[in-house]
Image (tube, helix red, strand yellow):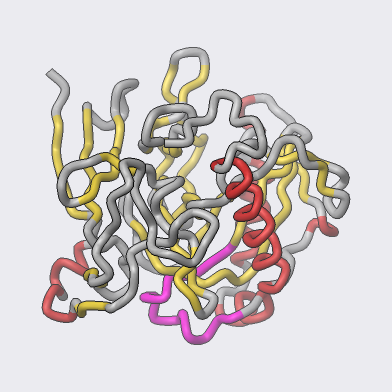
Amino acid sequence: MAATTRAAVTSNATAAAASSCVLLKTPFALKRGSNAALSFNDGRRLSKRSFSCKAIYNPQVQIRQEGQPETLDYRVFFEDTSGKKISPWHDIPLKLGDGVFNFIVEIPKESSAKMEVATDELYTPIKQDTKKGKLRYYPYNINWNYGLLPQTWEDPSFANSEVEGAFGDNDPVDVVEIGDARGKIGEVLKVKPLAALAMIDEGELDWKIVTISLDDPRASLVNDVDDVEKHFPGTLTAIRNWFRDYKIPDGKPANKFGLGNRASSKEYALKVITETNESWAKLVKRSIPAGDLSLL
């Protein structure tokens, strides 16, 4: 029988510092397409008083693991405290104000299992990607925490004239978080964007937003792309090269990058986030056909 475990979405550091948690008089989430409090799919609303522990922003959310890791049936579901499933893609808010955003960890740094939100499954749990019925792994470990920005979507019907006319890849926007701490699958971290890389994967636009957790010791030192070069020298080049080359061992060509093959500014990253959030809003309002995507 597949194992089922439950865990609060917290890091070891946060658990050890439980006494530093504070109550915030802010809503857990935003109602889709407005500034009101988020309603879950059954119409219930979350309390406006919620816990926040340092950089972890997961009040009243827990994860439930079904199955064994590194198996085809393994899933990481998100739930509210009543045990009702919610979608990490649709129900976790994107924006927290003051240029801060939620980031959901799919792949912890220094790991190689290709985990991702299952956008075509009910409640969009995190699972390990497959190809031809086999679990997918990167050829080598990824060196940064990797995941998604909730409530974003790269529209496959939109040709981006600034990036060689490439169409969106039909997924949430990817995030590369460069902080020191290793995340956990399903963790929700508060991050600030620093730069954007316009990867083109087999003709599809696949944005990589470079961020840092607010809990990282060097977070206050970096606020834009130039700061990354100063305080994390070589990191932007390493990220670009990692994503450029990771398919080569499988016999595929290297990925390309638009925008002059360089990382763009924080301002440009915020532009990408805004545009893809607007695309997601159209998707969940069904202004754009969803195809096989789950909107629950």
Pick the front one: 239 or 97: 97
Measured as percent of width and height from the top left, residue 154 is found at 65, 44
Q: Residue at x 74, y 42 (%)?
A: 200
The region drawn magenta spans 210-223
Measured as percent of width and height from the top left, residue 180 is found at 40, 68
Whether residue 237 is visible to the viewer of this picture, yes or no, is no
Q: Is 226 covered by the magenta stretch? A: no
Pick the front one: 24 or 182: 24
Residue 190 quadrant:
bottom left
Measured as percent of width and height from the top left, residue 93 is found at 43, 59
Q: Residue at x 61, y 39 (%)?
A: 246
Q: Taking 224 as reference, is 259 left or right?
A: right
Quadrant of the image for the C terminus? top left
Q: Residue at x 63, y 45 (%)?
A: 282
Residue 251 quadrant:
top right
Measured as percent of width and height from the top left, residue 244 is found at 69, 45
Q: Taking 205 as reference, is 62 left or right?
A: left
Against 135, residue 38 (above or below) is: below
Q: Is 212 covered by the magenta stretch? A: yes
Q: Taking 153 as reference, is 268 left or right?
A: right
Quadrant of the image for the N terminus? top left
**How many numbered circles are shown?**
0
Whether residue 116 is visible to the viewer of this picture, yes or no, is yes
Q: Residue at x 35, y 59 (%)?
A: 182
Pick the front one: 28 or 10: 28
Q: Residue furthest bottom?
A: 221
Q: Taking 225 as reference, is 162 left or right?
A: right
Q: Residue furthest front?
A: 43
